[in-house]
Amino acid sequence: MISKKQIRRNTLFVHRRLREWRMIAKGLLSTRHPVLAHIIPIRRCNLSCTYCNEFDTFSKPVPTEEMFGRVDHLASLGTTIITISGGEPLLHPELDEIIRRIRRHGVIAGLITNGYLLTVERIERLNRAGLDQLQISIDNVHPDDVSKKSLKVLAGQEVTNAGRTRRVWREH
């Protein structure tokens, strides 16, 4: 028997795919709108990769109302996908609300993160906010002097949820 949770997941999957197909159709029918835009709600990052010039260690998050204004403007232009990046966007205290604002406009919401701050609870919150796409930026297999964003570190990351320890993802 299929559980209510599985039915909900299947429904969300179908709904997302339909929205993606609608976006593709919109792009084929009209070139008078942005297809994809990136917004940066925070320049601060929890890492300091030596090659990166997209972050600092001191900036405050962009005020949420200002982010809402940017999202509203992009939506008014007909933007079909808004991707949030940074710095490390998971450091923004109102990230879930920004994602909700994107989704209220019917726009596909994406997120690019280094993955270090992802936990089961955080992933569940992102899902509840309506996040459609998650991209994890990994620079190499093993950490080195240039970048700690490695598959080895992230694959071994464990989180505790409801008294159970689980890996966020597994190395394949």
Image (cartoon, rainbow, N blue to C red):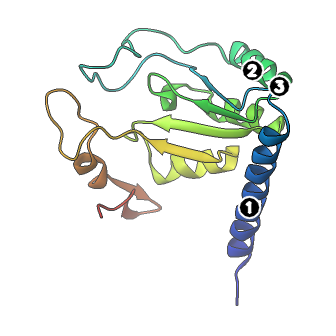
**Depth check, front residue: 148 or 159:** 148
**Position in image of residue 14 (x %, y %):** 75, 64
Q: Quadrant of the C terminus?
A: bottom left
The one of 118 and 22 positioned closer to us in this rendering: 22
In the picture shown, does residue 34 fall above or below 63? below
Residue highlighted by disc 2: 68
Question: In the displayed structure, would residue 148 be above or below residue 59?
Answer: below
Mark toward the viewer: 3 or 2 = 3
Mark 3 and mark 2: Cα distance apart in space: 23 Å
- N-terminal label among 2 and 1: 1
Q: Residue at x 77, y 15 (%)?
A: 69
Q: Looking at the picture, does residue 63 appear above or below residue 85?
A: above
Residue 12's mark?
Answer: 1
- Name the residue at 79% across, 57% down: 18
The quadrant of the picture occupied by the N terminus is bottom right
96 sits left or right of 119 in the view: right
Kind of residue sitting beneath label 2: Phe
Judge the density around disc 1: few (<14), some (14-19), many (≥20) Cα neighbours within 10 Å: some
- How far apart are the alpha carbons under marks 2 and 1? 25 Å
Q: In x, y percent, where is residue 142?
A: 17, 44
Quarter assignment of residue 96: top right
Q: Residues within 10 Å of mark 3 (few under 14, many from 20)?
A: few
At mark 3, the secondary structure is loop
- Give the mark, 3 or 1, whose residue is nearer the N terminus: 1
- Residue beneath disc 3: 32
Tell me the residue at 26%/42% (across/down): 150
Q: Tag 1: residue type?
A: Leu
Secondary structure beneath dot 1 equals helix
Q: Amino acid at mark 3?
A: Arg
